[in-house]
Amino acid sequence: MDKILVSVIIVLHNSQKVIGDSIRALDKSEYEGLEIILVDNASEIPADKLDLISRHPLRIITNNNNEGFGKACNIGARAANGEYYFFLNPDARPSPDAIGKLVNVFEDCKQAAVAGPQLYFEDGRIMQSYRNKPNFKRLLFSRNSPLSKLPFFSKLTEDSLPPPLKHSQDVDIIPGTAMMVKKGPFREAGGFDERFFLYAEDYDLCVILNEKGYRIIHQPDASVYHIWAAGSDAAEFFRVKEHNRSIMKYYRKHFPDHTLRTLILSALLSLRKLYFSIRY
């Protein structure tokens, strides 16, 4: 049996429709030294009741409550044997060579703490795969801001989105959809901040690691396909609510002295929440 170097950590919450395809994609991986850890956040159908098998070592950790994404990832990391933690969404499918190419990032650069692949939609369209460090202006004109819906400001939103890369490069943020993190730096940072229930914990971790002198690297030669399943209306409203909460937690944590800007950002996000509450 190959030595475990990569622990694939997947957080589940009612993900029974997609997790099988994700495991089958991992079974096609050309990289042999990996294990799969599923952390089930109190799914209605528990993961240990599903018929999940893999050619790789597979373990299931069941939480009695929905602990949120960041805390569940930390639980998985504490149980992991690998030197690298590959946090992967249950609806994400790595290409056969993706894990190996991400591992190579760390082997080629000792200061790398996080590596991320190029994300694609199921139909092959390129998905946003890295982000610039969030600040007031970028959050103000982000795709989730009401200002992005207005003609003039929509141009500022487009300009704030970083373009796809052709070669590996240092970036600010790798999304938690598919991010590989080196064990040592992850533990040094204290893992994900568990105050973020869902969203922005990846922003926070990358910023902290970068401030500690580590590098965050996007490797576009590694491909992961993210299958965006259509959620229910209620689920969409829940995501908007949690996204707003996490963005505000992030901004207050990293910009504690920006009182006026915090109020402006909070007001804009409240408008977005109101829109979705009326719509749904």
Image (cartoon, rainbow, N blue to C red):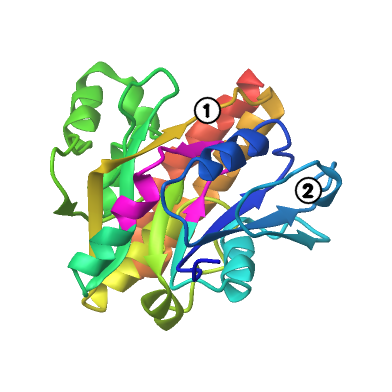
> Which structural element holds mark 2?
helix
From this view, report whether residue 206 is shown above or below residue 164: below
Give the mark nearer the N terminus: 2 vs 1. Answer: 2
- Identify the residue at image location x=57%, y=31%: 274
**Residue 38 in the image: x percent, y percent?**
66, 55
- Amino acid at dot 2: Ala
Residue 262 visible, this orientation: yes
- Identify the residue at image location x=60%, y=42%: 23
Please tell me the numbered disc located at residue 47: 2
Residue toward you, 78 or 252: 78
From this view, report whether residue 242 is shown above or below residue 190: above
**Residue 102 in the image: x percent, y percent?**
32, 55
> Which structural element holds mark 1?
loop
**Residue 90 in the image: x percent, y percent?**
59, 42
- Identify the image quadrant of the C terminus: top right
Give the residue at the far front of this rendering: 1
From this view, report whether residue 79 is shown above or below residue 178: below
Q: CA distance from mark 2 to mark 1?
A: 20 Å
From this view, report whether residue 214 is shown above or below residue 158: below
Please tell me the numbered disc located at residue 144: none
- Amino acid at dot 1: Trp
Please tell me the numbered disc located at residue 228: 1
Residue toward you, 79 or 232: 79
Q: Is residue 101 left or right of residue 55?
A: left
Residue 258 visible, this orientation: no
**Residue 191 in the image: x percent, y percent?**
49, 73
Q: Is residue 195 left or right of residue 179?
A: right
Q: Nearer the viewer, mark 2 or mark 1?
A: 2
Q: Is residue 63 left or right of residue 259?
A: right
Q: Which residues are magenta?
A: 87-102
Residue toward you, 128 or 260: 128
